[in-house]
Amino acid sequence: MALQYAILSLLSQDEGSGYDLLKAFEHSVANFWSASHPQIYKELAALERRGMVTHRRVVQQGRPNKKIFRITAEGRAELLRWLRKRHGIEGHNSITTLKAFTLHLLEPEEALAKLEEFREDARAELKHYQGIEKDLAPKAKNGDPVMLASYLSLLFGLNYARGYLRWSEQAAELLRERMARPVRKARTA
Amino acid sequence: MALQYAILSLLSQDEGSGYDLLKAFEHSVANFWSASHPQIYKELAALERRGMVTHRRVVQQGRPNKKIFRITAEGRAELLRWLRKRHGIEGHNSITTLKAFTLHLLEPEEALAKLEEFREDARAELKHYQGIEKDLAPKAKNGDPVMLASYLSLLFGLNYARGYLRWSEQAAELLRERMARPVRKARTA
DNA sequence: TGCTACATGTAAAATGTTACATGATTCG
DNA sequence: CGAATCATGTAACATTTTACATGTAGCA
């Protein structure tokens, strides 16, 4: 359902083909949304049936023809209605958190190694976003509202990666404390 | 697929019925995982077929009978195999980020109000977790490994909410800057 | 008397992924 | 010559949500 709004949002910036949308999901908005190509084509068809988008066929030589989709006035209105609704904080299913919750199955040393893995992943992710941010920041500060909105969504990802990193360090810290000062399970007879 | 591991993880702490699991997904682990009851019953059946869990029937008077599920040795081994695998940072589809990305459709004033909504939601969420944290922190520091693992997963949620809050404030700040010092779109003929 | 908790399921619909299918062009 | 890019779709499968279905006990 929400994928339709992701598509409408992308089309609200610029018209494009299903393939263009696919590339956007793989690159520019991979940060916060992903979709496979069959799903994109399915949702585009559904959106067209509902009058939210239209397309024109573009014949090309040497490469496959394509359909360029454009958002309609109704599509734009629908997107706005959705944007204005209040959704609250969404709880997503987080593999990492589930793993943290399951960490008691590992011996402390291995658990610590696992947290170290999380930390490495987070640092890599953070560096990645920081690279993009450096590029985008000046453009966003002086660019049009579309640029600013893109930048705000990037900042969300950046913040997330930062929180992830801080958490992995904090968690490792707690585990290390525990290892240094182990807990007696019961009276040591 | 991953839901099976969430179920195995819960059962690795304590045996329980499908209904117990449902309540866990609604409360204790709602933070990072959710599931509907049909899905839980289906996955329990699948896990049992694969020998990962077994159940015994408990007959009750005055209320429906129940099936208490228990993880098997193979289930535990499978859960450990999964835990040890490296998953990397998972990209989830975030409604909030999508909305941030779409914010250019609103006039700056309304966009700012939207960000203020995000901030309110984040503050509420953060307060909620902080309440739980106060309760759990002492128990986690002196409790068993299961307690510590639960605590680590709570910390993840806490960090997330903090990041969300900081982002919403940062985003509002950027927008306010922009409103004070608006951008000229092109040469003003 | 009506709502909530307890407790488990099936059926149908929606949503998403993976595999299958095609076919030219460009780059290394 | 093999892989990647461009470009769109179908089919099969997997996963998830919502609606349907049932029935007791306790609380307000």
Image (cartoon, coloured by chain):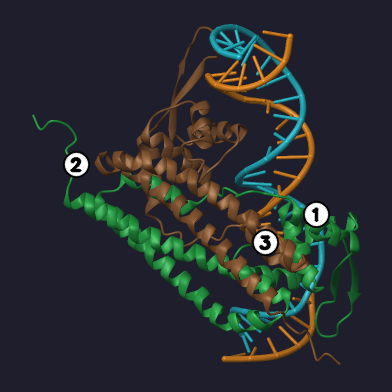
Chain colours: A green, B brown, C orange, D cyan
* Of the pair B49 and A41, the residue shown nearer to us: A41
Q: Position of residue A71 (x, y in %)?
A: 85, 66
Q: Nearer the viewer, mark 2 or mark 1?
A: 1
Gap in Å between the C-alphas at discs 3 and 2?
Answer: 45 Å
* Of the pair A173 and D21, the residue shown nearer to us: A173
Q: Quadrant of the C terminus of chain B?
A: bottom right
Evaluate whether label 3 is on the same chain as label 2. Answer: no
* Of the pair A134 and B14, the residue shown nearer to us: A134
Residue where numbered disc 3 is placed: B98
Marks 1/3 in contact by CB < 8 Å: the verdict is no
> With A87 as the anchor, is A79 left or right in this view?
right
Residue where numbered disc 2 is placed: A183
Quick one: SS at disc 1? Answer: helix
Q: Amino acid at mark 1?
A: Arg
Extreme-front residue of the structure? B180
Gap in Å between the C-alphas at discs 2 and 1?
Answer: 55 Å
Query: Which chain does the residue under circle 1 lie in?
Result: A
Q: Amino acid at mark 2?
A: Val
Question: Hey, which quadrant is residue A119 in on the image?
Answer: bottom left
* Of the pair A100 and A83, the residue shown nearer to us: A83
Quick one: SS at disc 3? Answer: helix
Residue where numbered disc 1 is placed: A81
Instruction: Identify the residue at image location x=72%, y=74%.
Output: A146
